Amino acid sequence: MISALAIMALGAIILGAALGFASIKFKVYGNPLVEKIEGLLPQTQCGQCGYPGCHPYAEAIAKGEADINLCPPGGEEGVRKLADLLGREVKALNAEEKPKQVAIIDENTCIGCTLCIQACPVDAIVGAAKQMHTIIAKQCTGCELCLPPCPVECIAMVAIPETVDNWKWKYPVTEIRKAA
Amino acid sequence: MLQLFKFKGGVKPATNKVQSVTLPIAVAPLPTRLAVPLHQSIGGMPRPIVEVGDKVLKGQKIGEADGWISAAVHAPTSGTVIEIGLYPAAHPSGLTAATVVIEPDGQDRWIDRQPVDYATLEPEAVRELLREAGVVGLGGAVFPTHGKLTASKTVPMEEMVVNGAECEPYITCDDLLMRERAEEVVRGAGIFRDLLRPKKVLIGIEDNKPEAAAAMRAAITALGDAFREFEVVVVPTRYPAGGAKQLIRVLTGKEVPASKRSTDLGVQCFNVATAYTAWRAIAHGEPVISRLVTVTGNVDQPRNYEVLIGTPMDELLRLGQPKADTDGIIMGGPMMGFLVPDQAAPVVKATNCLIAHSPELFPPKPPEMPCIRCGECARACPHELQPFEMYWFSRAKNFGKTQEYAIFDCIECGCCSYVCPSRIPLVQYFRFAKSEIWTREREKEAAEGAKNRFEFKQLREEREKAEKAEKLAKAAAAQAAKKAAEALAAASAPAETAAPASALVAAPAPDATSTPDAVKKATIEAAMERARAQRAAVQPKNIDHLPPAVEKEIAEIDARHTQVFGTADTAPADGEKNN
């Protein structure tokens, strides 16, 4: 009887120690779900979802405060991916889906006020006070945050044109012909 | 006799090669204009180094290679550059690409060609020469050849494979090249051999080209002892025996794994036409400005032509006299080629064949039927993939799964589509899946970069805020200390000497000769003096060792300044203000 108790107690101590050790050694910092959600977001940092950036939106989704269909740059596909990850229903996007765009500064009109540089969330605009600014097209996420601060309205959004390099093979479609 | 190996799968379509081998190679006449696309190889896009209106000579470089994996492009004939801009590309999309358009002057004047004896050069210099001459893989992949001419450091080179298999139906340009210019092909392969130093050089030729094999054998014998490790090996005709991995497998028995390059196994593979152009580039100083193109299909006179790069395809096809019902041009063979959307697109380095398309020759495919899971495609796949699995997942847009089934090992040879009893365009699905995956990969990378930059910006803004707050706190503390000191001084000073104006400043010592105002003035004077001395001491650093013309210009400007401002001294101050 006593030996049985002792064995059980010993087992409990060993297992408890192992669990305690594991909980310190393999501690998970941060919420892994937030990171997963953030990985699916397009990182435009545009704030169109109503949150100041992709990370806060991911946090809000993880907490269940925000819906999954608030990200226009992610598009319908982004909603689908989020729904897959979270096991929620797929919803229609609550905004219009736009083709991918990039901002262009009209260099003749730019007065060099640096306001757009401050607004750009991803440091994709270069320039200095009273010098012409320009946008690094490769790094522009098309978030449109630089449009409102510009006092002379010299920034325009342009859809990214299709070139031989970014052209995609189309999904094969079977032609439906009229039966004779 | 070398023991041959087999590759799995493959198909045997009708070769249709006899039509175009009856006539010898002809030189295509000079076209009305030549549109030379700048991006004709894998890797960096060459930068144009000519301008509209420039006169160019035949073989003059018009595009500078960008980066190591890139190859220069050259003017195919002498003439005038009339346009640099977007022009229809030889691409299945039908989109435009950056192109230099040259109007020939009809004189066909060469640049000063400089043949070199490559035996006297360092291997690095030979590779550089090939890059400058625009030598790329002419089998269709257009990978810059110099990038393949470095042997693996750890694995000794065993075999070098020269690919003369030309397995795709209709195409005969390599066949004719080997028949008529065998010696130069062998000499070109000799250059590659001397750079890679393999133990054996195996020239693989399919057994439906006995004349080519005989010509190559004769050339090797004629060239004598220096080429004794060369061997012509006739391989059985079976599509796609001309795929690099398949030919390596057949000739050496080595299977190149997906994650490795063939050099890791001590093998490297080159096309015969590449070897030929390498020889022309080194021994004759002629860059790649033309190539052999088979013109065949629905034409009255199928034949091989030596065509200048940039010749419009429709103009070239006219030489073969296309029949009345021709309704398109296929670039490449019927298995891997594509219908050219714009027939004005130019012949590029990758163009080995133009097939006139007609509904009779290539009847439209009957509609796609459901997959019956017969597994024929898996049996035909030369890469031992499972096309039916990849098809299901591509169709369902489940791209992660297609990658699990190694979709990127697919060489798009078309064997699976060829054998499919349900006539499913399998390769089209794979191409679709591949380009979707690439796009996603690019987007993911862009998102990652955007996230990093965003986080860095936030970090920077926070740091700046903290720094500013610290500065403000310091200034406030200093202000407070100063005020306290003043209060102390005011309290200790005799009340009767404090004039209203000097109540706030520290009271002077009773024995001081000057008033507080004078002290202030003196301080300002001293500061100005210091600034003047500093200005005089600082000399602009960018005006040493200037050419006389610039010095003269500076002198003129100084003179103008003196005239306008009275003294030359004001000029730098003015400059500072502008900065």
Image: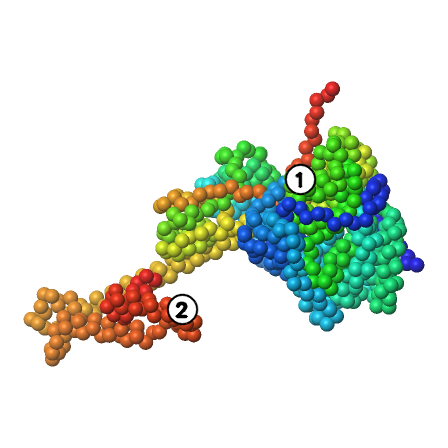
Q: Residue at x 20, y 73 (%)?
A: B525
Q: Please state which of residues B510 and B313 is positioned toward the viewer in this rendering.
A: B313
Q: Secondary structure at mark 2?
A: helix
> Label 2 is found on which chain of the structure?
B
In the image, residue B355 above or below residue B453: above
Q: Please state which of residues B119 and A95 is positioned toward the viewer in this rendering.
A: B119
**Residue B370, image x, y percentages:** 76, 31
The reply, left or right, for residue B13 in relation to residue A93 is right
What is the image's colouring?
A: rainbow
Total count of labels? 2
Q: Quadrant of residue A154?
A: top left
Q: Residue at x 61, y 52 (%)?
A: B79
Looking at the image, the residue that sits furthest to the right is B1
**Residue B165, image x, y percentages:** 82, 51
Mark 1 or mark 2, earlier in chain = 1
Q: Secondary structure at mark 1?
A: loop
Q: Which residue is mark 1?
A: B343
Amino acid at circle 1: Gln
The answer to whether the residues at label 1 and label 2 have Cβ atoms under 8 Å apart is no
Q: Which residue is mark 2?
A: B550
**Residue B574, image x, y percentages:** 29, 64
